[in-house]
Amino acid sequence: MTEILRGAMISASLIIAIGAQNLFVLKQGLLKNHIFFVAAICFFCDFSLMTIGIWGVGSFIERNPLITNTLAILGALFLLWYGFNAFKSAVQGNSSMQVDSAQPQKNSLAKVVLATLAVTLLNPHVYLDTVVIVGGIAGTLSTDQKWAFLIGAVCVSFIWFFGIGYGARLLTPLFKKKRMWVILDTVVGLVMFYIAYRLIFYVIYGQ
């Protein structure tokens, strides 16, 4: 039980923060846009990466600059593109993005799945958190303790992603106002650009 709680607390400290992935899930939840698949993909990626990290792969990725730099460059390019589109939506004040409880905004499932995978797997911070940090902390544990640690960590991930995905509907009345979408898109754009900047800085200066 101790390791389950420890895994849960560490996972929560890493996952519950304003970031590209969380903002993406929140936005899809507000739009009622294939929420189950978005949350499920985010959870499955966390589960897979945490499992890989806990069982020893984290140290290999951490020691291989080619892998980390490639991920950083791809992630920066994707985040710059996503951030640009968010700013474009904010400037245009796209009224089609307003929430209508009777008519949820729906993109194709394939498009949503690809976007979710991209915002999750093209962000090196995801690997840093799930594989390197979580894996590093669990590296000194016994086999039984590692399983307990993993259970605690992934339970938090499951609760968090499905919670913000389906819980976003509580904000629906607020986001019926066009101004709130402008604010959200602006915040999304700023976060995406900042993370992209940090990734480029990492590739150039190694920190």
Image (spheres, helix red, strand yellow):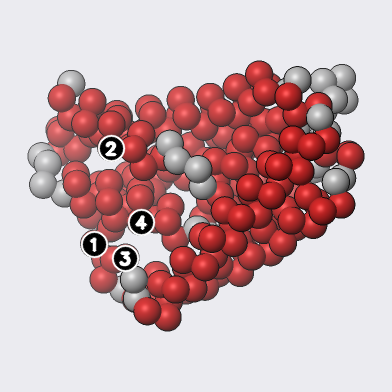
| Quadrant where the image shows the C terminus | bottom left
| Quadrant where the image shows the N terminus | top left
Whole-Å distance between the Cαs marked 3 and 4?
A: 9 Å
Whole-Å distance between the Cαs marked 3 and 1?
A: 6 Å
Image quadrant where residue 166 sits: top right
Q: Which residue is drawn at 35% across and 50% down?
A: 129
Q: What residue does disc 3 label? A: 61
Q: What residue does disc 4 label? A: 128
Q: Is residue 141 left or right of residue 63?
A: left
The answer to whether the residue labelled 3 contacts the one labelled 1, judged by CB atoms less than 8 Å apart, is yes
> What kind of residue is marked 1?
Ser
SS of the residue at dot 2? helix
Q: Tell which tag, 2 or 3, sits nearer the viewer.
A: 2
Q: Which of marks 1 and 4 is nearer the N terminus?
A: 1
Q: Earlier in the sequence, mark 4 or mark 2?
A: 2
Q: What residue does disc 1 label? A: 59
The answer to whether the residue labelled 1 contacts the one labelled 4, judged by CB atoms less than 8 Å apart, is no
Rate crowding at label 2 as few (under 14), some (14 to 19) or many (20 or more) other CA atoms within 10 Å. Answer: some
Residue 134 rendering spot, x and y as whole percentages: 27, 46
Whole-Å distance between the Cαs marked 2 and 3?
A: 20 Å
Q: Residue at x 74, y 56 (%)?
A: 87
Of the pair 58 and 18, the residue shown nearer to us: 18
Residue 158 rendering spot, x and y as whole percentages: 45, 29
SS of the residue at dot 1? helix
Of the pair 145 and 124, the residue shown nearer to us: 124
| Label of residue 10 in the image | 2
Rate crowding at label 4 as few (under 14), some (14 to 19) or many (20 or more) other CA atoms within 10 Å. Answer: some
Q: Earlier in the sequence, mark 2 or mark 1?
A: 2
SS of the residue at dot 3? helix
Of the pair 204 and 143, the residue shown nearer to us: 204
> What kind of residue is marked 4?
Leu
